[in-house]
Amino acid sequence: MKELMSHNIEETQRFAEQLANNVHGGSLILLMGPLGSGKTAFAQAFGKALGIKRAIKSPTYTIVKEYELPDVGKAQRFIHIDAYRLEEGGAETIDIDQYLDQNHICMIEWPQFVQDYLPDNYIEIHFDFLSEKQRKLTVVLAENADMNHQKLIRNWLE
């Protein structure tokens, strides 16, 4: 576990960019935290750092948004999932497995609503409010994370 302190949105975006610079296909990144804590801003900066030129919006209503990546050396697609609307059920209607392969980088907001369908191989980032602008990001590596996720954490945070 590692804690990152963000004093403003730009710093949160820099953390996302640094993660994107080290990510690889097959990565699963889970973003947790209350509404307005910075999850979507993090995902947007992450996608932009991967080279996505079009607007990256939270897929709150569509649930899943796929973006082709210009650098196919990292992966073919960035998959952004917002599971917030699945709080009352419906997670079984999304074939999450199709997004969890070596050709995709998958980032999920509100993963607790699809937890039963996720592997135990991921990086989890918790966003906590400290003040209007400050956030604490707590980065947790899943207990059964593979070597690729372990290496990603080391390269990103060290």
Image: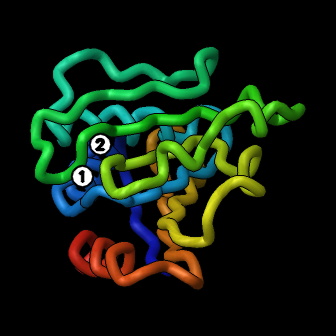
87 lies above or below 29: above
Rendered image coloring scheme: rainbow
Residue 137: give x, y in percent of width and height: 48, 60
Residue 46: which disc? 2
Closer to the camera, 157 or 12? 157
Location of the C terminus (image quadrant): bottom left
Measured from the top left, where is residue 145 in percent x and y? 49, 79
Type of amino acid at the residue the image marks with label 1: Ala
The structure residue drawn at horizontal position 20% and vertical position 35%, both measured from the top left corner, is 69
Query: Whole-Å distance between the Cαs marked 2 and 1?
Result: 5 Å
Does the image show residue 130?
no
Instruction: Tell me whether the residue at label 2 lies in contact with that at label 1, contact meaning CB atoms closer than 8 angstroms.
Output: yes
Q: Residue at x 74, y 26 (%)?
A: 85
In the current view of this chain or complex, which residue is farthest to the right? Answer: 88
Tell me where residue 77 sits by quadrant: top left
Label 2 sits on what residue type? Phe
Front residue of 107/100: it is 100
Q: Is residue 58 above or below residue 29?
A: above
Numbered mark located on residue 125 in the image: none
Front in this rendered view, residue 13 or 116: 116
Mark 2 residue element: helix
Q: Residue at x 53, y 22 (%)?
A: 59
* Mark linked to residue 20: 1
Q: Is residue 101 left or right of residue 116?
A: left
| Left or right side of 76 for 84 | right
